[in-house]
Image (tube, rainbow, N blue to C red):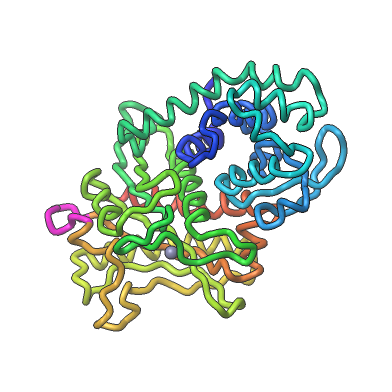
Amino acid sequence: MAANELLKRLVTIFSDDDLRHPQLRGIALAQWLLESGRATSDLSTRHYNFGGLKWRKELAGFATRIQYEAHDGVDFYCKFATIENFITGYWVFLNRSPYSGWEAHVSTPEEFIKFIGPVYAGDESYADKVIALLPEANQLLEDAVRVRAEGHQGHEDVHDANGKDLGVIVIDPGHGGTQNLPGSDANHAISVSGVKEKKLALDFSLILRDQIYARAKTGERVKVVMTRETDKNLPGRERARFAFDHKAKLFLCLHFNGNQNRSARGTETYYRAKENGNINLEEDMTFAQSVQTALFKQLKALDNNAKDRGIKPDNEGNPNLPGFGVLNDHNLGNDERRDPCRAAYIEAEFITNPSVEKLLISGPDSINNRTLAMRAVADAVLQQMRQR
Ligand SMILES: [Zn+2]
């Protein structure tokens, strides 16, 4: 059975997650396969709750509480802002008193699930159902690790093997990991509910990748390369280098803004300033404007208070500011190319704004909303790729 895109995203991220008990990786995933119907349940697609986790007060700070009707009636469940938050939240859930002592039962996957299973599901046969899915879970994880080791950062989605080749786009989710590096801090903004920008940047970027593949037409071939698919950081220069290494047509960085003034909001997109040596200024501005317009229009349709902050040079008009290394034409390899890559840097919204928090981060429709937003960007990107 082919894994759906959401399941693939869960597996990719979890396969690279630092676990205190790595031997439990497979069994935890097996449990999530069961609970989420292989990432097809409403709780998983709408709320990133792959574990069927009911709301418990200890999850405050890791999840938000949503009312949800499951097979056993209406109850409060956890909603997670990102897949990464779900993975963290799952272990927080187990660290509650009903499971106390579970860490003394972790020598094998079977021992672990037989200990927690009866509490988790109130069902003696539960552990066996999960154990039956362990080989599938292990295989998914192995595949994800192998793909990463082989350096396959993107795959070509062939709608039609003889189709028109639209080329390559590199998507760069901002920040990541725990170390500040030249041209890329581990994190910058933090949302009202405490979700880190790096996690949102990754989630939105992975949705954007999947939307680009989904929105390409029959007869078109397109390849999306990610600078990162898990929680790691890369220096700005290395991120840009992906564009050159993959002969990318487009390079798109995705970030979120933050401000001490909680009422600040709006969407803006940066391009390399002329004073910073942009060698394809007009093309970059056209690309930046196309993603900016598409994203703003969709956000405005979802929330009338959305604000268009427009496109901006990366020195904000100050000729003494060096701008963003990730947009530097030399780092992108554009000085060595006859067909320079077009680059833009989206600051999608201010995650420090409570309305944005509800709209895109932790409100009941936030995952659907962000998918619509990334679909609009995907359409703009594909339109750009069709032109040259
Ligand atoms: Zn940022």
Q: Looking at the picture, tell me which residue is in the foreground, 105 or 307.
A: 105
The quadrant holding residue 252 is bottom left
In the image, residue 336 lies in the stretch drawn in magenta: yes
Viewer-side residue, 296 vs 108: 108
**Coordinates of residue 251 in the picture (x, y in percent):** 32, 54
In the rendered structure, does residue 188 fall within the stretch colored magenta?
no
Tell me if 373 is positioned left or right of 170 in this view: right
| On screen, residue 220 above or below 58 | above
Which one is in front, 330 or 93? 93
Extent of the magenta region? 332-340
Q: Residue at x 74, y 39 (%)?
A: 100
Image quarter for ligand 1: bottom left
- Report the side of 270 relative to 14 (left or right): left
Q: Position of residue 172 (x, y in %)?
A: 37, 53
What main secondary structure does the magenta stretch of the protein show?
A: loop
Q: Is residue 181 left or right of residue 241?
A: right
- For the image, the number of numbered tags is 0
Residue at 24% x, 67% y is: 281
Percent x, y of residue 184: 35, 61
- Give coordinates of residue 351: x percent, y percent: 56, 66
State which quadrant residue 10 falls in.
top right
Name the quadrant of the N terminus: top right
Q: Is residue 238 above or below residue 6?
A: below
Q: State the image quarter where residue 344 is shown.
A: bottom left
Q: Residue at x 63, y 72 (%)?
A: 305
Q: Residue at x 25, y 82 (%)?
A: 319
